Amino acid sequence: MEGTDVAASMSFSFNHQIYRAEVFAVLDGHGGIGASAFVKDHLVQYLQNALESTKQTSLTDAVIRDALKSCFIQLDA
């Protein structure tokens, strides 16, 4: 079991505005080093894509939660 972490800055476009966010994650490595490395390499991009592809008009906690859920589902596929 080999864990890792993510600490990254990201920006994304939402409803014609640019937002900046910090992303932090602790990856426990239970899926193996390959899984941890994959998530570390793709988490920010998948989250950015999920946030930018939503059809919602305001950035709410629910929109962020749904984007995270979509990101996690894609990472687990």
Image: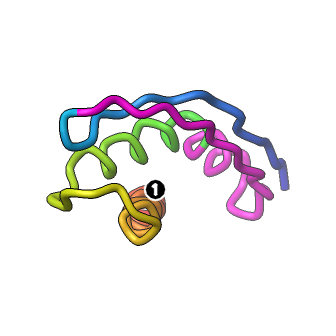
Q: Nearer the viewer, residue 4 or 70?
A: 70
Q: Quadrant of residue 63?
A: bottom left
Is residue 25 placed above or below 9 in the rendered structure? Answer: below
Q: Quadrant of the C terminus?
A: bottom left
Instruction: Report the residue marked by disc 1.
Output: 75
Where in the figure is residue 48, as x and y percent of width and height? Answer: 38, 40
Where in the figure is residue 19, as x and y percent of width and height? Answer: 41, 34
Q: Nearer the viewer, residue 56 or 28?
A: 56
Q: Nearer the viewer, residue 68 or 42?
A: 68
The residue under the point 39% across, 63% down is: 60
The residue under the point 64% across, 30% down is: 8
In the structure shown, which secondary structural element does the residue marked by tag 1 occupy? helix
Other residues around mark 1 within 10 Å, as few (<14) / some (14–19) / many (≥20):
some
Is residue 23 placed above or below 30 in the rendered structure? Answer: above
Left or right of residue 76: residue 5: right
The residue under the point 43% across, 60% down is: 64
Residue type, label 1: Leu
- Asked whether residue 52 is drawn in magenta, I would say no
Magenta range is 17-39
| Residue at the farthest left position | 55
Is residue 50 placed above or below 10 in the rendered structure? Answer: below
